[in-house]
Structures are given as structure tokens and as C-alpha cells.
Image (cartoon, coloured by chain):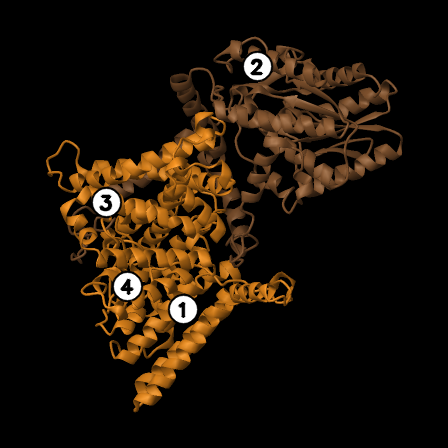
Chain colours: A brown, B orange
Amino acid sequence: MHDRPTSESGDAAESRASGAVGDPRPRAVLSGVLAGIALFTLAGIRFAGFDPAAVGMGRNTTAVNVESYNGTRVYGPPLPDVIAALCESARALRGAGNEVALWLGASQLHGLNKMKKGDRLAVHYANERAAGRGAALRYLQVSFGNANFHELLAVYLAFRRRGFTPDRAVLAFTYDDLREPGVRPDVAALLKAADAAAWAGLGPGGEQLRAEVESNPDDRAGSAPVERNAASGTPQERVEAGLSQTLEARWPGFRHRDRVRAGLKSTFTTWFVRTFLRRSLRPVLIPARMQSWNMAAFRSLAGALEQDGVRTLIYQAPHRPGENPFYHDRAAYDAFFVDLEAFCRREGIAFADLEGIVPAEYWGYDNTGLPDAFHFQVEGHRRLARAVDAALDDLGEP
Amino acid sequence: MLFNSWTYLLFLGLVVGLYWALPRRYRISLIVLASLGFYAMWRWEFCLLVVFSAVVDFVCSGRIAGSSTARNRKRWLLASLVINLGLLAFFKYTYFAYDNIRSLGTALRIHLPAHESWALKIILPLGISFYTFQTISYTIDVYRGVIKPIDRFPTFLAYVMFWPQLVAGPILRCGEVVPELLARRRFRIDDFAIGVQRIVQGLFKKVVLADSLAPMVDYWFEQSQAGLTAIDVWVACFLFGFQIYFDFAGYSDIAIGSARLLGIRFPENFDWPYLARSPRDFWKRWHISLSAWIRDYLYVPLTGRRYQVSSRDGIAVAARGRVGYRQAWALMLTWCIMGLWHGAAWTFVVWGLYHGSLVLAYRLTPWLRRLPERFPRLGWLVMLAAVMLGWLPFRAHSLSQACHWLLKVINPLEYSLSPWVTGLSVRIAGYSYLAAAVLTVAMPLWHKLRQVGRRTPADSPFPADVLHAAVLTAMVFAVILCMQAKQQFIYFQF
């Protein structure tokens, strides 16, 4: 059996005297606490001038949640109220005599690097361009981080459930997202209680999606609501805010604690990445079963679009040119898109290779200070919008 | 008031300073006022509830002691129990009971409105489960003749409301607290140092360790079960096991340390629980005061055994010997209530029954009973896995999630690395695996290092003082860096 248990403080249970074996002595405690405070103060002074943005840390890439064009909402994440709002937008746009193109993809569509006031997303610029060339075509977008094809299929089916099918569809194809598994609960919730007709004729990808949706735990029954944050809206919250302000005013180390955190994180991250990963925190390793799982969903989505008579454009998403740390096997990446293009040709789907349309100077850092290979600055959004709208223009009238 | 806040540190400094500055006769009043202020920093109106509960038990226990007949004594005891448990049931279990009635009604095609539509909004008072059990223990101890009733209400109120243990324990007996509150004592630098060290240690466990694990745990439990592998489930269970341990043990450290600053000694509430080699051993190490309370006020009355008079040793000292029918059902009922005490949800009941079943299984199965002695390391591994898996229903959003995840664990085909990890899709997934592995290995190593440290000779080149100071320096640095008064303690919601 184990030794007679001793407490975590080191107090032996039978000893009632202070200073039992294992207890720290007052001078150790005092020096430890004072040294900790001093060390923190020194760290605050050391990192007082640390600018996270200079090493690419901080909010380099901003995720935009809402985008409009001429007062009409044209973009949002995959939430029921957003889908409903975009259906309303679609009705209004059609009422004005426009065709509607639904643009689906991942965070490249709503992530803005080095965002400034007035910067807009590609969907806004695409609408601008279409209007500028006199086309009766408007774009709506749903995008969310690392969206895989099961999730994009779910979004499309969610629109279908609400009685909306677009005239055209634009699908962003990001090679990296082929490794993404699962359907996040918010997206699965879009299709909860969908009837059998919603799943009909979708093929293996649709069946997999249905299995995911129906297995998603959304039942929280039996949990009694408990006020979960014991400080929110309480007198303590107000006192704490006042104390923090006072500490910031009088204690330099405390004032710069965010910079200390950022500085330490930057130091550790850089060391860790350079030592163990050498190039990137996200090298592309696509497990074969994930790729085939996602491709099954892609085929189901392509089939559903064809079934609904939607003219579709698939494009190979832009990537940061030049130093390209993301592909261990560039040959596999290229071969994949050759195959994809061949598939699109066979199925009568338009395909556009947009990999290199955004020059290097319009990319930046991600929020951990590493080169961002996916999210460009506003000029990248303009160029993407131009390329996509031009490609749809080339498709011609139905 | 949250312990992990600058407000609490300021409050503590002021109260401790006043405590030692004031004459002894004012100390009880100071404790009462400080405790009221501590609780009022959350919601002042609920102070009235705690005071009411204290008044009820003060009056009832006085009447019990003053009654000449057993019948009267029992009446007053029942009055106290009904009022206290009635309040607890109202605030904590009304929604739960109603939701279950509503579910039954739905099955019978009787449609009842959801409780969200009620005009009455019930807010769970902080610490109600803890202080209710504490006052009940007092009344029952008076009834049993273990203690005499306290004759001064301020002293009793100080015992009930003593702020370090008011909202999340330890659940202490009157005989453990009141003599400490009333003792003549002078300021001792050793007690003060130990108190400071415990507080720093507790804050480190909470704001650095537990709060760092929280996002990882939240991430896994929000995933759809279809995308998870059995290893993901184990990782999530281990991470939550460590999160709740650091969170709750951290709170207990701060509570014990805060009391120690006043020279008041609390018994320990945790004793390296994840080093346990059997269920009995685990319940001697985890939330010891609750385990002891359940032993003396629930399990023992059900089995007719002799009760203890301290909040030490947990339920294990009673759960031994031959297991007859009475002991078995008492065990399961006890753990069912233990689970329900933690929360108004069937997931907590399942957690309780799971642990009851573990205890029963070890008692009824000879080879399991001998496993910790004959194969200590294997016994430890088996117990660690069992305890960590037990956290699954505790943390799951629903029974169905718990069941789905459990099915993965018992299916050998589900044992593969997560696609999130192999594809390095989500950074948090990879960090989760790493964190679970590091913590599991580090825990017994740290325990070993502490034992070695305690045996270090006085003339060692690395005297204990230097090590203590170095560790405290690092902890203080990390605590200041990470402390934000936003993340409440998990046990606040029980």
C-alpha cells in the first residue's frame, strides 16, 4: 500500500506545531513572493517597448462577421438567423431583377489581413464589379474558418430547406481544408430535424453528413441553469476594474502585463516552431481517409448543384506566393488540382486556377506572428473579387 | 467574491491586518462582518438567506439541547432539516424536478410550458450546498450529543459564514472550527508564511493550470461525437480530471491558506487523489470533507455503523468489512445523493452511481481488492483510468453525449489518433494530447520530488529554503501574469 498520506502542504497530519517538516520557512516565503513581484516588474520594464505587431503578433488578421452591399446583407457565418437574412437578401435581389450567386468557402473569404477602416471583403467588391459592368448578378457569401465540404454541403442544404436555390454557385477550394474532419455543432444544427426529402439523392457524402448531423449532441436536457459567472454584474466586478486601473497607474510591470504575455508567447512560439517544426505551425498532412471523406461530400455538393440547375464555378484558392512552407509534397498538391480540373471538365463545372493572383506584398502575418499563407490584405480581396466575377462573366448567360 | 482576483487579495490584506490589530474580543465580530461583506460582493440580498439558515439552526439546536423528551428533540431536528433541505431543494432542484415532470408530461401528451417562461427566475445562491451541509452537520451533532450548542449567535454565525470556506468548502464540523475561532492566539510568522504559501499555490493551480486547461476541455466537449476517436475521449476525460482537480484543490488551498493567516487551521481537503490505488483510497484523498460528511450523516445512519466526529479520512473508514444487502444499497444510495449534490442533472447522478459501483466492485471482488497491495503500479493505473473515465458523465452536456462517448471508449475499433492531431488541423487538439500526457507523467514525479525534498539533509547544497523560494518566485510571476477575475471556480456552481 502507499505510504501514510501526507498532505499537499507538507503538513504531517499528526503535527500541530508550525514549521512541520516540509513547510516552507518564513524567509523562503517572503523572499519567494518578493522575488516573484520583482521579476514580474523587471519583465514589465523589459517588454514595455515590445510591439507585438512588429513581430507579426496580435490581431494581424481580423475575422469580419458582417458584410453588406448597398444596404443589403451579403455575408455571414453559418447560423440560422444569417441563413434567414441572406434568403431575404436573395429575394430582394431577385425582385430587383438580379441573378444570385452563392459563394461558399473558408476563412480566406472573411479574413482581412492588416485591416484598415474602409476595407471590405471580396464579396462586396464582387458585387461592386458586377454592378459596374452592368451585370444583373449579385453575390451572397457564407464562409467560416476551416470549412470542410461536409459543412459547405450542409450550408447549401440549409438554403434549400428555406426554399432558396441560387442561380450560380462559387466554391472556394482550399487544399489544406481537405484534412478537416467533423461537422461543427452550429452547422449541424442547420439541418436538425430535416426530413428524408432533404437528404434524397445526395449519395455517400450526403449519407455521411446525415450521420454527422444526427449524431451531434444538441440535447442539454437535465442541466439546471446555474448562474455561471459569479463576478459578472456584481459589485466585485466594479471594484476589480477600479483596482486594475490603480495597479496599472502605479505599477509599471502590471501596466505592461499584456506585452509581457505577448513577448513571452512570441519567444516561446518562435523557439518551438523553429526547433520542432522549422517552418510552420501548420504543415499540411492530409490523412487519406479525411481527403476521401471530404471529396465524397464535394461530389455530393456538386451533384446537388447540378440537380438544382445551378451553374457552378470552382476555383483553386489563392496562396501566398514565393516562400511556400505549406506543402511537403508540392507534386501531390499539383496533381490533386489537375485531377480536380479534369473532374470539373467531365461534370461540366467551370474551374479557375487562382492560386497566384495575389502578389506577395498583399499578404502578412497570422495572429501568432508566422507568415499567413491564407489571408490577404484588402487588395487581395479586390483581386479575388475581380477574378471570380470575371470567371462568372466568362460562363455567360445560362 | 472570487478568490482569483485583486479584490480578494486586498480584502484579505485588510481583514487580516484588522484581525491582528484589534483586541481579541472584536475578532468574531470582524469575521462576521468580513464574511457578510465577502458574500455581499456577489449579491447582498442572498446574505439574508445565509443568515436565515444560520438563525434556523441556531434556534433549533438550542431547542434540541433544551428539550427533555426524545420526541421534542426529534421534532426540532426535523424542523431544521426540512427548512434547510427545503431551501436547498427549492433553489437547486426546482428546475430539474420540473423539467423531468415536463418530460414525463410530454411522453403522456400533456404539454407544460418551459420553465424559461416562468415569471419567477431562480438564481442558485453561491455556496448553498456547502453551507447547508455545514449547518445540518451542526444540528445533527447537537442532536447526537457530540457537541454542546453554541450559546452566542455571533460565534455561530462566524462558524457558518466564515468566508474562506463559505462558498466552496471544506465542509467542516463545528468542533473543528469554533475552538479555532475562539482560541487565544498571537500572531505567528510561521502560520502567516504557510498561509501565504498556500494562497500562492492555490492561485497557481487555479489561474495558471486550471484556467489554461479550460479552453482545451471546452473544445473537446463541443465536438460532434462522430469526429472523435476513443483516444480523443480519453484525452478529454484526463484534461477535465486535471482541470477540476486544479480548480477545486486550488480553491481549497486558498481557503486553507486564508484561514492560516488568522492562525486558524483547517484540515486538508485533497491529498494527491490521482495517486490513489483503489476507490477507498481515492475517497480518502478527494474532497475529503464532503466524503466525510456523507459518511457520518448519510452512510453511517443507513448502515448502523459508528459515526466519526471529524471531517477527515473520507467515507473509506466506514466502507469496509462484509458487504451485505443493507451496506450495498446504502452505498449506492449514498453515492446517488453525492452525485445529485454536485448538480441538478442526471449526468451527476450517473457519476455518483459510477463511483458507488466502483467501490462495490472492489469490495465484492477479491482480486480487485488485493490488486493495490499485490501490484501497486497496476492498481494505480487501473484506478487512474477509472477515475478519469468517471469524469465523462460529470462534464458531458447530456446523458446521450456521455453514452456516445462511452461507446467509443469500449469499442476497440475506435482507437486511433485523432484526424485533428494527425492532420495538425487544430492546434488546440495537438496541445491537448501533449498536456494530458505531460500532466499524467508529471503528477507522480512531482509527488516523488516533494518526498525527496523533504528528506534533503540540512547541509545539502540545495537547501529547501532556496527551492521553496525559487518555486514561489515562479508561481507568483505566473499568477500575476495570468490572473483575471473572469473564470469562476467550477465548484461555485454546485
Q: Nearer the viewer, mark 3 or mark 4?
A: 3
Q: Position of residue A179 (x, y in %)?
A: 52, 25
Residue B292's label in the rendered image is: 4
Are callouts 2 and 4 both on one chain? no
User: As rendered, which of A229 and B327 lies closer to the eye?
Assistant: B327
Circle 3: residue type: Trp
Which residue is identified by label 1? B132
Tell me the CA gap for discs 3 and 4.
Answer: 23 Å
Q: Which of marks 3 and 2 is in front?
A: 2
3 or 1: tag closer to the N-terminus: 1
Q: Which of marks 4 and 1 is in front?
A: 4
Which residue is identified by label 2? A336
Looking at the image, is B337 positioned above or below residue A33? below
Q: Position of residue B192 (x, y in %)?
A: 28, 52
Tell me the CA gap for discs 1 and 2.
Answer: 65 Å
Q: How crowded is mark 4: few (under 14 residues within 10 Å), some or many (20 or more)?
A: many
